[in-house]
Every structure is written in structure tokens, then in C-alpha cells.
Amino acid sequence: MLCLTVDQALRLQLMESHQAPSLNALIEKNRTYLRLWLPWLDDNTRESDSRNFIKCSRERYANREGLDMGIWQQEALVGVVGFNQFSWGPRCGEMGYWLDEQQQGAGIMTRCCRALLEHAFTDLDLNRVEIRCAVDNAPSRAIPERLSFQLEGQLRQAEWIYDHFVDHAVYGLLAEEYKS
């Protein structure tokens, strides 16, 4: 099972089905906040939905289609980070993440993304990592900006969030930039 140590307090771990109650509880705790930015909240309302997400995530990982890892602070699940998809021809991955609202502002996601980038460029041999986030989501945009990603552009009306479109800022980081 894939597990990446971030630091003494944090680890990233491929989730297992028995962790569905923890994932579901974290989603419920943060539902109102996450609903501002993520389109899938209405499709994940029960523990069985979280269990199915974990099952699909493990299948996608086994098929090299994506990677979703739980963020564990000591023994508590506090978020999810990973690659929504891989494009193996150009060796590119699209990174996504979300964190418990109460845990934000302590550098947790920046440290977790840094650890995942190391895995991506070293172990997975990716050439490019992309992050897309809502233009108005300042906390999410701060992550790629802290990690030396380049702002490459803006996609107009890129995502439908329940009752409105949001524009996406697109950030990219190349392996050669990461290693330098």
C-alpha cells in the first residue's frame, strides 16, 4: 500500500475501505465549506458513497489513471490530495486537493503537495504537473503559487458548481523547474 511520509505529524496514504466512516465524517463536517468549490458534494452523502469513492480510487490507482491519498495528521484524516488524472503520453498529472476547514492556514496542504510532487517527479517520472482551481478560491491558488508553479492562464466558465459557472486559474510545473 502506498504511503508517503510528509513529516513527523503528516502522512499521505492510499485509502482503504475500512476508512470510509472517517472520510464520510470529514466530508459531512466540511460540507457547507467544500460546496463552495467542489461539484461532487451532492453525490457523496452517505458512508456507502465514501466507500465507493475509495473503491474507485484504488481501481484508478491500479490502472494508473489517478491517485487519491488521504492526508493523515497523526491518526486523524484531515483531507485528500492526489492526481485527478494522468496523461501518460506527455507524462502529465492534474493535481487536486481539499482540507478540513479548521486545519487550513497551518501549511499542511503546502507540505503535502510538496511531498506528492516529489513522488510525481521522482517515482512516477512525470514531466508536468498541473493544478486548476477556481479563480476566486484564494486559499487553493496560494498552494501552487507557494510551490513555484507558473500561472499559465485562465479558463472561462470551466466548471459548473451547482448553480453557476466558475473560471479556473491553470498552473503548471515542469520536472526541470522542480529539480532546479
Image (cartoon, rainbow, N blue to C red):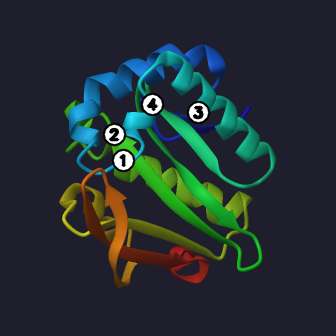
Three-letter code, disc 3: Phe
What secondary structure is found at the residue carrying circle 4?
Answer: loop
Q: Earlier in the sequence, mark 3 or mark 4?
A: 4
Image spot of residue 82 (x, y percent): 54, 49
Point 45% across, 47% down: residue: 112
Helix, strand or loop under label 3 = helix
- The residue nearer to you, when weighing 180 against 110, is 110
Residue labelled with disc 2: 99
Query: Residue at 54% across / 60% down in the picture?
Result: 117
Q: Amino acid at mark 1?
A: Met
Identify residue type, mark 2.
Leu
What residue is pinned by disc 4? 44
- Rounded to the nearest angstrom, the CA distance separating label 4 from label 2 is 16 Å
Which callout, 2 or 1, points to the residue nearer the camera? 2
Q: Quadrant of residue 26?
A: top left
In the current view of this chain or complex, which residue is farthest to the right? 63
Q: Nearer the viewer, mark 4 or mark 1?
A: 4
